[in-house]
Image: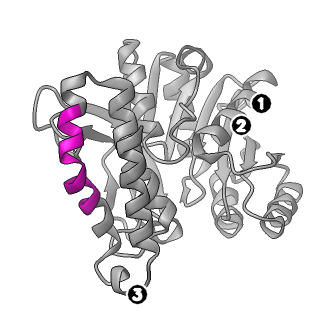
Amino acid sequence: MSGLDDVALVVVNYGSSGLLATNLPRTVGESGVRVVVVDSLSGPGERAAVARLATQHGWELLTPATNVGFGGGSNLGATHALATGSRVLVFLNPDAWTDPAGLGVLAAAARSRDRALVAPRIHRPDGSVYSRGLTYLHRADGTMSGRRRSPDDVPWLSGACLALGAGLWGELGGFDEDYFLYWEDVDLSWRALALDARLEVVDDVQVVHDEGGTQESRGRAKSETYYRYDIRNRMLFARKNLGPAEVRRWRRALPRAARAVALRGGRRQFVEGVGPWRGVARGLVEALGV
């Protein structure tokens, strides 16, 4: 048995067939690891492109009839993989890649520590650090940073690359699909800690994240969807997991937090079109209504 025989690599696609074509083959190499791609529907052309790639590379393809979001797509892929024999899950974004050795290290860590969420450090293509693994949620106001500021701060691991065993996945019940997009990984980490599971960072795995591939690149205009759900889900998380006093505090901090989210795409975007304004406004309205 190789180190990847019981592993399923789960990737949720939404309009990213070009990234899949580049990143998944170099991640998988000749390892033979099982790949489950969930194509969250973005259009018939993209669906056809992903189907061609799946046939070419031998990937298992799930094709929901709608856009099911990151959490919903991840849950579909995981359910399929576990029902058909996999015991370790590795989730990877389409704009990220590693190599078979990296997959093996992540899988081994998740397999040997069945009640742990495992993530790597993530680098940019130029070698600089994109994420050191753990990010801290500051309970005082819902902001985040790479360092703990208070004993009340809570660590979380990014869903861009995350591994865990079937046992812990079953305990967690998967991602909370109410989020649809963004903050699902914060919520999953929070619930794992509540179950006394561990969050672990594997330092000796090289995972690269192409910031230009999706909505994560700072300083570049982002989609309405990005602003809407990042702002909305901040308050959704608070409502689901925090007490009334903390929810009120996060609500008071929401305008400042929304401004910070909006400025990730730079200032110019706000004079070039109404999309960013609309996304921020919708996110604020929905955040106040959850």
Q: Is residue 90 above or below residue 58?
A: above
Residue 272's disc number: 3
Dot 1, how many residues are within 10 Å of its Cα: few (below 14), some (14-19), or many (20+)? Answer: some
As drawn, is 126 to the left or to the right of 142? right
How far apart marks 2 and 1 lie (CA) works out to 5 Å
Residue 262 horizontal/vertical position (percent):
32, 65
The residue at which mark 1 appears reads as: 80
Query: Which of disc 3 and disc 1 is earlier in sequence?
Result: 1
Query: The magenta stretch spans which residues?
Result: 248-260
How far apart marks 1 and 3 lie (CA) works out to 43 Å
Q: Quadrant of residue 29?
A: bottom right
Report the amino acid beneath label 1.
Answer: His
Residue 77's disc number: 2
Query: Which of disc 3 and disc 2 is earlier in sequence?
Result: 2
SS type, badge 2 = helix
Dot 3, how many residues are within 10 Å of its Cα: few (below 14), some (14-19), or many (20+)? Answer: few
> Who is closer to the viewer here, 61 or 105?
61
